[in-house]
Amino acid sequence: MTPASGATVVVFARRPVPGEAKTRIATVLGVEATHRLYQAMVRDTLCNVAASGLPVLLVHTPGPWRDASVPTTWQRGDSFAARFASALAAAQGPTVLVGSDTPHLGPDILRRAADAARAGHVVVPSRRGGFSLYAAAKPWTDPVLWKRVFAEKDEIRALRALGAEVLEPAVPDLDEIEDLWWLRDTVPMRAAPETQTMLRGSGGRLDDAVAGPPPAQRSVDAAPSSGASGGGDGR
């Protein structure tokens, strides 16, 4: 049953092409392991949307998406802000936009954001000033507006100034090896099962890198990063 909000979840993503997604993680894990990990993230994200009962639209970087099990369309524009705005316009109505790098962002928060957005604009913060989710009954689709937001060091502050409501708690994107430590150490297996299986399974460099140092030895700088705002896989 579709929730009463009538919102569509737009998953803003890069096509799963080796070497094109999660490039910072790939410098540690290697291209092939990162490619498999990214595919797991996408599958978990789409499963969360399906469990939410909300319809989904996968808006990805140009080119074919093989074996897509959901409706798809391309991002449009020659800048990140333009592509982001085009993704928001694609649903043609109430929208909840997430990236494909938050597979731990579950169906409950998707429904909560869709309901909260009936009254305006809603964001879920990431870390270090970014955001992991944006939802609105009438989303902002002006690329100039988003260019200004993305130019700010603190995007949440910029969105608050525009009138957006902030839903806590923060939900980190998975952009760095440290973010994978965070996922493995703090998120239940059921929240992102395929991604977690990739992190915990056998895989050479992936296992070694994700194992990381003991928590007591991790520096303050190892906190999860915000990644690309509102679905960084499109950058």
Image (cartoon, rainbow, N blue to C red):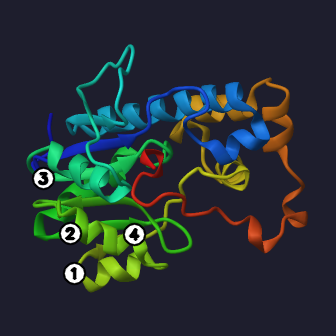
Q: Amino acid at mark 4?
A: Phe
Q: Residues within 10 Å of mark 2 (few under 14, many from 20)?
A: many
Sequence-wise, which precedes: disc 1 or disc 4? 4
Q: Position of residue 216 (x, y in %)?
A: 88, 66
Residue that badge 1 annotates: 163
Mark linked to residue 121: 2
| Residue at 37% from the left image edge and 55% from the top image edge | 80
Cα–Cα span, label 1 and label 4: 16 Å
Q: Nearer the viewer, residue 152 or 33?
A: 152
Callout 3 crowding tier (Cα within 10 Å): few <14, some 14–19, many ≥20: many
Along the viewing direction, whichever of 140 and 119 lies nearer the viewer: 140
Q: Is residue 223 left or right of residue 51?
A: right
Residue denoted by label 3: 94
Query: Tag on residue 150?
Result: 4
Disc 2, disc 1: CB below 8 Å? yes
Give the mark toward the camera: 3 or 4: 4
Helix, strand or loop status at disc 2: strand
Q: Secondary structure at mark 4?
A: helix
Q: Are marks 1 and 4 in contact (CB under 8 Å)?
A: no
Please rate how many residues cluster around mark 4, counting C-alpha atoms within 10 Å: few if below 14, some from 14 to 19, many from 20: many
